[in-house]
């Protein structure tokens, strides 16, 4: 952790893949009370193909500012859930909060397991590439290829197009979910985090400052 009080530390509570679980809601409440985050970051699949009202109620319950992207199992109507500063969807957006820059892209690539919120690589690239230069935190649902994306069958299910963008832009922190079994942290200049599915009571706390990124899986 930083030694200097001048090196501001921002605490993020990160969760993904709630899939409408009541247990996931309780986990978030308990974790927020214990860790006192500055910001809650949700990486998609808040619901299990709806309803939108469940996601809205979840967002309204949070006691800290919340940003999120939809997952492939969320209805596209989640894009319209915006009540800043309490909560906002950052799919296809860049914003500054708590001294950090964030950009987001939700859903998953079209094709197998595309679900109800999906995109083509060309649409993703044209929408996300202009947002990620000199970025602190990239908020995704689908991981980049080769980063927290290994399925139980031994297949890397991440997006090669996302991997290409991330490799070029090198944000400080990349957050993703989608692959439930790929919980973990990878550090290779950029820090990659999959906090694990919140439906299984998993989440992560990230402390980030100008000098480093520290991840605790909880």
Image (cartoon, rainbow, N blue to C red):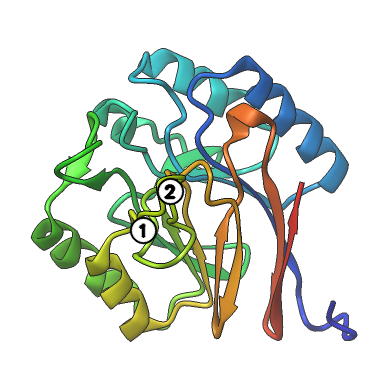
Is 21 situated left or right of 5 in this image? left
In the figure, residue 173 lies in which quadrant?
Answer: bottom right
Task: Report the label total.
Answer: 2
Residue tagged 1: 156
> Which residue: 46% across, 22% down?
56
For the N terminus, the image quarter is bottom right
Name the residue at 56% across, 23% down.
Answer: 58
* Numbered mark located on residue 102 in the image: none
Where residue 155 sits in the image (x, y, percent)? 35, 54
Measuring from the top left, give residue 122's x and y in whole percent: 9, 62
Residue at x-position 23% and y-position 73%:
130
Residues at marks 1 and 2, CA–CA distance in whole angstroms: 6 Å
**Residue 61 found in image quarter:** top right
Q: Is residue 95 above or below residue 119?
A: below
Q: Nearer the viewer, residue 122 or 76?
A: 122
Crowd around label 1: few <14 · some 14–19 · many ≥20 (10 Å)? some
Q: Is residue 124 depicted above or below 163 in this figure?
A: above
**141 versus 127 height, above or below:** above
**Residue at 77% over, 39% down:** 32
Q: Nearer the viewer, residue 77 or 44?
A: 44
Disc 2 designates what residue? Answer: 151
Percent position of residue 184, x then y: 62, 58
Furthest-front residue in this view: 153
Label pair 1/2, CB-CB below 8 angstroms: yes
Which comes before the other along the chain, label 1 or label 2?
A: 2
Q: Is residue 94 left or right of residue 33?
A: left
- Closest to the observer, 213 or 10: 213
Disc 2 residue crowd, few under 14, some 14–19, many 20+, Cα 10 Å? some
Secondary structure under tag 1 reads: loop
Residue 7 at what x, y percent from top left?
Answer: 78, 82
The residue nearer to you, when weighing 152 against 179, is 152
- Secondary structure of the residue carrying tag 2 is loop
């Amino acid at each position: 952790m930083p030694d200097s009080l001048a090196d501001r530390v921002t605490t993020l509570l990160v969760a993904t893949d709630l899939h409408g679980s009541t247990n996931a809601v309780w986990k978030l409440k308990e974790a927020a009370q214990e860790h006192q985050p500055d910001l809650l970051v949700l990486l998609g699949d808040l619901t299990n193909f709806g309803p939108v009202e469940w996601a809205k109620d979840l967002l309204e319950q949070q006691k800290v500012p919340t940003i999120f992207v939809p997952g492939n199992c969320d209805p596209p109507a989640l894009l319209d859930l915006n009540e800043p500063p309490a909560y906002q969807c950052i799919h296809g957006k860049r914003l500054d909060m708590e001294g950090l820059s964030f950009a987001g892209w939700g859903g998953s690539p079209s094709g197998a397991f595309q679900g109800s919120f999906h995109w083509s690589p060309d649409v993703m690239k044209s929408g996300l590439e202009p947002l990620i230069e000199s970025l602190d935190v990239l908020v995704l649902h689908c991981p980049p290829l080769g980063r927290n994306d290994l399925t139980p069958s031994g297949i890397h299910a991440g997006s090669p197009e996302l991997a290409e963008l991330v490799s070029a832009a090198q944000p400080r922190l990349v957050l993703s979910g989608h692959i439930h079994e790929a919980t973990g942290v990878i550090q290779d200049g950029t820090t990659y985090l999959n906090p694990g599915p919140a439906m299984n009571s998993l989440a992560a706390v990230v402390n980030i400052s100008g000098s480093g990124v520290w991840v605790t899986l909880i």
